[in-house]
Image (cartoon, rainbow, N blue to C red):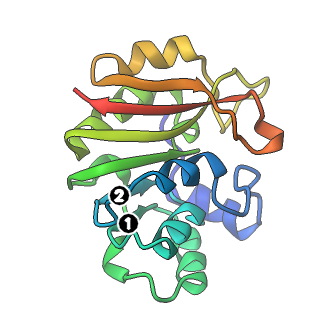
Amino acid sequence: MKPLDSSYWDGLYQKKQTGWDIGYPSPAIIEYFKQVKNKSIKILIPGAGNAWEAEKLWNMGFNQVYILDFSQEAVSAFKIRVPDFPDSQILIEDFFKHEGLYDIIVEQTFFSSLPSSYRELYASKVHSLLKPQAKLIGLLFNHIFSFKGPPFGGTPQEYRFLFANYFHFQVFNIAYNSIKPRQGREHFLLLRKK
């Protein structure tokens, strides 16, 4: 199965069928960044959608946040909401064709939008976009969904196998500060590039 294209995602945003979007930044991700002192690090949020995390990080003083999404609808809504965010840091393109180097890549529901056949490619691509010793941080659903998806679930065992060739696992536990509907249902990950 191919990843769902930009017109598919644009349609969901137009119809407001965005059940994955919690409407505010994920507490687990923001708590992580509260511990990061260097505000000039370069951060990429792929599949950013409405990019609540980007807005919050920008307001926290992280001035090198980049959002990437191939849905024009999602990006347009973000630009209206955060008009002072630099256009040069809004990337409307396919993640798998993107080039650049980052200190941190943030995972928030993008991975779960990809069919399982694309997950190895995701791990490899994230690895290639990170500077030496840089990090992938974020959340992954830690269970299989009963429906076809997206989102597509998975298991911690699968993720360990998938990322082990590319990353050192520094933190990979059930998130203690997930939003209520996802309590116990997602893992927080902090992986360092090998």
Find the distance from the CA under tag 2 to the CA under tag 1. Answer: 5 Å
Q: Which of pointers 2 and 1 lies earlier in the amino acid sequence?
A: 2
Determine the residue located farthest toward the right in the rendered image.
181
Front in this rendered view, residue 88 or 174: 174
Residue 7 lies left or right of residue 178; in this view the side is left
In the displayed structure, 22 sits above or below 145; it is below
Marks 2/1 in contact by CB < 8 Å: the verdict is yes
What residue sits 83% from the left and 40% below the top? 181
Q: Look at the image and tell me whether residue 166 can be seen.
A: yes
Kind of residue at badge 2: Ile
The residue closer to the viewer here, 12 or 40, is 40
Q: Is residue 108 left or right of residue 193?
A: right
Query: Picture quarter containing residue 191?
Result: top left
185 up-or-down from 95: above or below: above
- For mark 1, what is the residue? 65
Residue that label 2 marks: 43
Type of residue at label 1? Answer: Val
Q: Is residue 57 above or below residue 157?
A: below
> What residue lies at 54% left-to-right and 71% top-to-bottom?
55
Quarter of the picture containing the C terminus is top left
User: Residue 89 at x, y = what percent?
Assistant: 34, 73
